[in-house]
Image: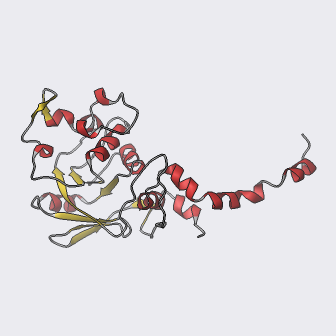
């Protein structure tokens, strides 16, 4: 199937449908495809503004170079007394059994601070596939997308409506249609995402996987620019 590479690679937000290929690759990124027809889950509310990456994953845990194992240290200083795993803080939301799900809903300006990619690793390793907020720091947003975590930007008003829902309420995120819905009320909003990142998430691609998926198209595009060696020798002097 011929793919419109220029359109897919565009980083401008779009509401156009992205392509979901029938056989997702699992390459260096090892990402899981995101459900195109709708992703439904209960959510974990964290109504705190200006959550920076040092709060998401403290700097002392940045020595590892793989993504595995960061989830246990997500919000470490907020979860435990004196960094002691045997003393969880009962008032922190991740320590409350009634709150669970694969969607984290956070206050405005999530992911500010340093550019550490480990913040996205920790959220994914803990089990979050979607983060909802009314604003994300740009670098964090890109890191999340590159690691298979979908940042969904909603209005401040819609964010407050989510926070007002009881803990059993589910949210449905439809990546193909670029909508997020509060299932209990039916209220919904559109969100933006670049067509390229949308395609990658739908198929479980990292950047390398995507390039491999369009290898034939790239070769076809480049072929007029790379004539056979004989033509080069005829047309150019070395």
Choose between 236 and 41: the one closer to the eye: 41
Image side of residue 201 versus residue 136, left or right: right
Question: Residue 172, relative to residue 51: is it above or below?
Answer: below
Measuring 9% from the left and 61% from the top, which residue is drawn there? 166
Q: Position of residue 44 (x, y in %)?
A: 17, 52
Quadrant in the rendering for residue 143: top left
Image side of residue 52 versus residue 226, left or right: left
Q: Position of residue 162 (x, y in %)?
A: 17, 60
The furthest residue to the left: 90
Q: Position of residue 176 (x, y in %)?
A: 38, 68
Choose between 97 and 16: the one closer to the eye: 97
Question: Residue 23, relative to residue 134: is it above or below?
Answer: below
Question: Residue 114, relative to residue 135: is it above or below?
Answer: above
Measuring 38% from the left and 52% from the top, which residue is drawn there? 148
Question: Residue 1, relative to residue 145: is it above or below?
Answer: below
Image side of residue 194 versus residue 149, left or right: right
Quadrant including the C terminus: top right
Quadrant in the rendering for residue 202: bottom left
Quadrant including the N terminus: bottom right
Choose between 190 and 93: the one closer to the eye: 93
**What coloring was used for the rendering?**
secondary structure
Measuring 34% from the left and 39% from the top, which residue is drawn there? 68
Q: Position of residue 76 (x, y in %)?
A: 20, 34
Image side of residue 101 versus residue 167, left or right: right
Total marks shown come to: 0
The furthest residue to the bottom: 186
């Amino acid at each position: 199937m011929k793919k419109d590479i220029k359109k897919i690679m565009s980083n401008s937000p779009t509401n156009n449908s992205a392509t979901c290929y029938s056989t997702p690759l699992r390459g260096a990124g090892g990402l899981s495809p995101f459900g195109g027809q709708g992703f439904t889950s209960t959510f974990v509310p964290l109504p705190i503004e200006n959550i920076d990456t040092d709060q998401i994953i403290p700097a002392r845990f940045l020595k590892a170079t793989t993504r595995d194992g960061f989830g246990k240290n997500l919000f470490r200083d907020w979860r435990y007394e004196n960094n002691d795993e045997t003393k969880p803080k009962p008032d922190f939301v991740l320590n409350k059994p009634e709150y669970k799900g694969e969607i984290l809903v956070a206050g405005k300006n999530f992911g500010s601070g340093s550019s550490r990619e480990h913040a996205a690793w920790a959220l994914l390793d803990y089990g979050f596939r979607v983060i909802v907020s009314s604003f994300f720091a740009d670098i964090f947003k890109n890191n999340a997308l590159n690691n298979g975590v979908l940042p969904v930007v909603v209005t401040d008003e819609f964010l407050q409506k989510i926070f007002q829902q009881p803990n059993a309420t589910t949210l449905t995120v439809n990546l193909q249609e670029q909508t997020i819905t509060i299932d209990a009320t039916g209220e919904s909003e559109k969100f933006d995402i670049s067509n390229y990142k949308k395609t990658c998430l739908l198929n479980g691609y990292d950047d390398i996987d995507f390039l491999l998926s369009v290898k034939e198209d790239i070769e076809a595009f480049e072929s007029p620019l790379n004539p056979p060696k004989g033509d080069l020798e005829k047309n150019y002097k070395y």
